[in-house]
Amino acid sequence: MQSRPLTWEPPIDIYETRHEFKIMIALPGVSPEHLKVILENDQLLISGKRNFPVSEEAEIRRVEIPYGRFERSIELPVGHFEIGHRELVNGCLLITLRKF
Protein backbone atom coordinates (compact mmCIF):
# COMPACT_ATOMS: atom_id res chain seq x y z
CA MET A 1 0.00 0.00 0.00
CA GLN A 2 1.46 3.32 -1.10
CA SER A 3 1.28 6.27 1.29
CA ARG A 4 -0.17 9.54 -0.05
CA PRO A 5 1.35 12.88 0.96
CA LEU A 6 -0.56 14.89 3.55
CA THR A 7 -3.06 17.32 2.08
CA TRP A 8 -5.61 19.85 3.27
CA GLU A 9 -9.06 20.60 1.83
CA PRO A 10 -10.08 24.16 0.98
CA PRO A 11 -13.66 25.16 1.87
CA ILE A 12 -16.17 25.50 -0.96
CA ASP A 13 -19.57 26.98 -1.77
CA ILE A 14 -21.73 25.56 -4.57
CA TYR A 15 -24.64 27.37 -6.24
CA GLU A 16 -26.87 25.76 -8.84
CA THR A 17 -28.95 27.52 -11.44
CA ARG A 18 -31.05 26.02 -14.19
CA HIS A 19 -28.13 25.93 -16.65
CA GLU A 20 -24.97 25.72 -14.54
CA PHE A 21 -23.18 25.07 -11.27
CA LYS A 22 -21.06 27.84 -9.78
CA ILE A 23 -18.35 26.66 -7.41
CA MET A 24 -16.29 28.98 -5.21
CA ILE A 25 -13.15 27.53 -3.59
CA ALA A 26 -11.31 29.59 -0.95
CA LEU A 27 -7.64 29.62 -1.98
CA PRO A 28 -6.03 32.87 -0.75
CA GLY A 29 -2.33 33.03 -1.54
CA VAL A 30 -2.45 30.34 -4.24
CA SER A 31 -1.08 31.30 -7.65
CA PRO A 32 -2.94 30.22 -10.81
CA GLU A 33 0.12 28.25 -11.95
CA HIS A 34 -0.17 26.12 -8.78
CA LEU A 35 -3.76 25.04 -9.55
CA LYS A 36 -5.08 22.02 -11.37
CA VAL A 37 -8.79 21.52 -12.19
CA ILE A 38 -10.00 18.22 -13.66
CA LEU A 39 -13.55 17.27 -14.60
CA GLU A 40 -13.84 13.51 -14.86
CA ASN A 41 -17.13 11.60 -15.00
CA ASP A 42 -19.12 12.72 -11.94
CA GLN A 43 -16.17 14.32 -10.06
CA LEU A 44 -14.56 17.74 -10.12
CA LEU A 45 -11.05 17.60 -8.68
CA ILE A 46 -9.21 20.75 -7.60
CA SER A 47 -5.63 20.32 -6.47
CA GLY A 48 -2.49 22.36 -6.07
CA LYS A 49 -0.08 23.81 -3.58
CA ARG A 50 0.12 26.86 -1.32
CA ASN A 51 3.76 27.71 -0.64
CA PHE A 52 4.93 28.84 2.78
CA PRO A 53 5.50 32.61 2.44
CA VAL A 54 8.54 33.09 4.70
CA SER A 55 12.13 31.93 4.65
CA GLU A 56 13.63 29.27 6.88
CA GLU A 57 15.29 32.03 8.91
CA ALA A 58 11.98 33.40 10.21
CA GLU A 59 10.94 32.67 13.77
CA ILE A 60 7.42 31.32 13.49
CA ARG A 61 5.08 32.62 16.20
CA ARG A 62 1.83 31.06 14.95
CA VAL A 63 0.67 29.18 11.84
CA GLU A 64 -3.08 28.71 11.39
CA ILE A 65 -3.34 28.89 7.61
CA PRO A 66 -2.71 25.51 5.95
CA TYR A 67 0.22 25.28 3.53
CA GLY A 68 1.50 22.63 1.20
CA ARG A 69 -0.42 20.36 -1.12
CA PHE A 70 -4.22 20.58 -1.19
CA GLU A 71 -6.91 18.56 -2.87
CA ARG A 72 -10.69 18.82 -3.01
CA SER A 73 -12.96 16.38 -4.77
CA ILE A 74 -16.54 17.44 -5.46
CA GLU A 75 -19.09 14.80 -6.37
CA LEU A 76 -21.48 16.05 -9.03
CA PRO A 77 -25.02 14.83 -9.66
CA VAL A 78 -25.71 12.54 -12.60
CA GLY A 79 -25.51 14.53 -15.82
CA HIS A 80 -23.16 15.98 -18.42
CA PHE A 81 -21.01 18.98 -17.51
CA GLU A 82 -18.34 21.15 -19.10
CA ILE A 83 -16.01 23.63 -17.44
CA GLY A 84 -17.17 27.00 -18.71
CA HIS A 85 -15.39 29.80 -16.92
CA ARG A 86 -12.59 29.70 -14.37
CA GLU A 87 -10.91 32.63 -12.62
CA LEU A 88 -9.19 33.65 -9.39
CA VAL A 89 -10.98 36.56 -7.73
CA ASN A 90 -10.16 38.00 -4.29
CA GLY A 91 -8.44 34.80 -3.18
CA CYS A 92 -11.18 32.47 -4.43
CA LEU A 93 -11.22 30.21 -7.46
CA LEU A 94 -14.56 30.61 -9.24
CA ILE A 95 -15.53 27.76 -11.57
CA THR A 96 -18.65 27.61 -13.73
CA LEU A 97 -19.78 24.18 -14.89
CA ARG A 98 -22.29 24.25 -17.74
CA LYS A 99 -25.03 21.60 -17.66
CA PHE A 100 -25.95 19.68 -20.81
Image (cartoon, helix red, strand yellow):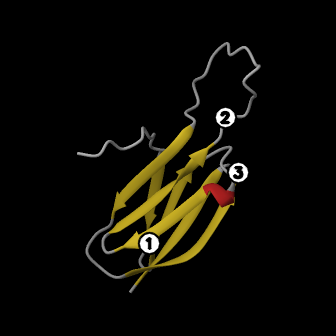
- Judged from the image, the secondary structure of the residue bearing numbered disc 2 is loop
Residue 74 rendering spot, x and y as whole percentages: 37, 58
Residue 49 rendering spot, x and y as whole percentages: 58, 47
Residue position marked by numbered label 2 in the rendering: 52
Of pointers 2 and 3, the one earlier in the residue sequence: 2
Of residues 88 and 35, which is closer to you in this image?
35
Residue 29 rendering spot, x and y as whole percentages: 68, 44
Of residues 43 and 19, which is closer to you in this image?
43
Question: Which image quadrant is residue 3 in?
Answer: top left
Mark in front: 1 vs 3: 3
Residue position marked by numbered label 3 in the rendering: 90
Left or right of 9: which side holds 51? Answer: right
Disc 3 marks which amino acid?
A: Asn
Of residues 51 and 10, which is closer to you in this image?
51
Q: Residue at x 29, y 79 (%)?
A: 79
Relative to 13, residue 95 above or below = below
Q: Residue at x 38, y 87 (%)?
A: 100
Mark in front: 2 vs 1: 2
Q: Quadrant of the N terminus?
A: top left
Separation of marks 2 and 3 at Cα, in angstroms: 19 Å
Disc 1 marks which amino acid?
A: Thr
Of pointers 2 and 1, the one earlier in the residue sequence: 1
Residue extending furthest toward the bottom: 100
